[in-house]
């Protein structure tokens, strides 16, 4: 996605348009472009079909990040991962001026001014008269309160 950000800010109009189209395809792609399934009344999947690559739309092909097939003793395990739609939408929105350059996770407020205090350590006499250190709850709090 870093390359997409740089390309969309590029001065080459052809390159900008190509990147924009790619990002729009990723943002619009859906898992159901690639996989369909049926479920019974209880919601259990009864039939799952993967669309052959020859029948996938260009949008669906662009949206696929990874297909992994792992043989198991029960058959093949198939994992399909799609590209991150929110990242693509965020880049497009920023390019269209819908978001300020810093309007994302980097600009979220942080918590500051927190002082952490450990428990107070006080000497404790054991039944045999020996003195050891034990942690006590900070004043105003009960031991066991989080």
Image: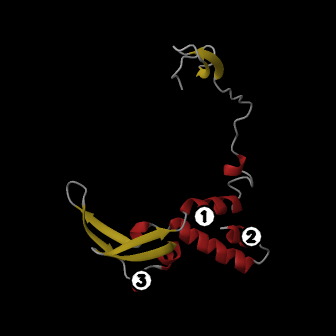
Q: Is residue 104 visible?
A: no
Other-residue count near label 1 (Cα within 10 Å), few / some / many at <14 / 14–19 / ≥20: many
| Disc on res. 53 | 3
Up/down of 55 relative to 80, above or below: below
Left or right of 24 on screen, residue 96: right
Q: Position of residue 3 (x, y in %)?
A: 70, 72
Left or right of 58 on screen, residue 132: right
Write down the residue under mark 1: 88
Q: Position of residue 72 (x, y in %)?
A: 33, 75
Write down the residue under mark 2: 6
Nearer to me, 54 or 69: 69
| Residue drawn at (63%, 14%) of the image | 139
Q: Mark 2 and mark 1: span between their CA atoms?
A: 13 Å
Secondary structure at numbered mark 3: helix
Secondary structure at numbered mark 2: helix
Nearer to me, 125 or 113: 125
């Amino acid at each position: 996605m870093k390359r997409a950000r740089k390309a969309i800010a590029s001065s080459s109009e052809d390159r900008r348009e190509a990147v924009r189209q790619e990002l729009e395809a990723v943002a619009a792609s859906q898992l159901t472009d690639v996989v369909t399934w049926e479920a019974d009344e209880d919601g259990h999947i009864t039939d799952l079909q993967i669309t052959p690559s020859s029948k996938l739309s260009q949008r669906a092909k662009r949206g696929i990040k990874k297909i992994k097939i792992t043989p198991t003793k029960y058959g093949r395990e198939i994992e399909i991962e799609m590209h991150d739609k929110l990242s693509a939408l965020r880049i497009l929105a920023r390019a269209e001026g819908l978001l300020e350059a810093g309007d994302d996770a980097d600009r979220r407020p942080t918590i500051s001014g927190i002082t952490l205090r450990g428990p107070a350590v006080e000497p404790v006499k054991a039944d045999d008269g020996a003195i050891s250190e034990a942690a006590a709850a900070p004043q105003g709090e009960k031991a066991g309160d989080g």
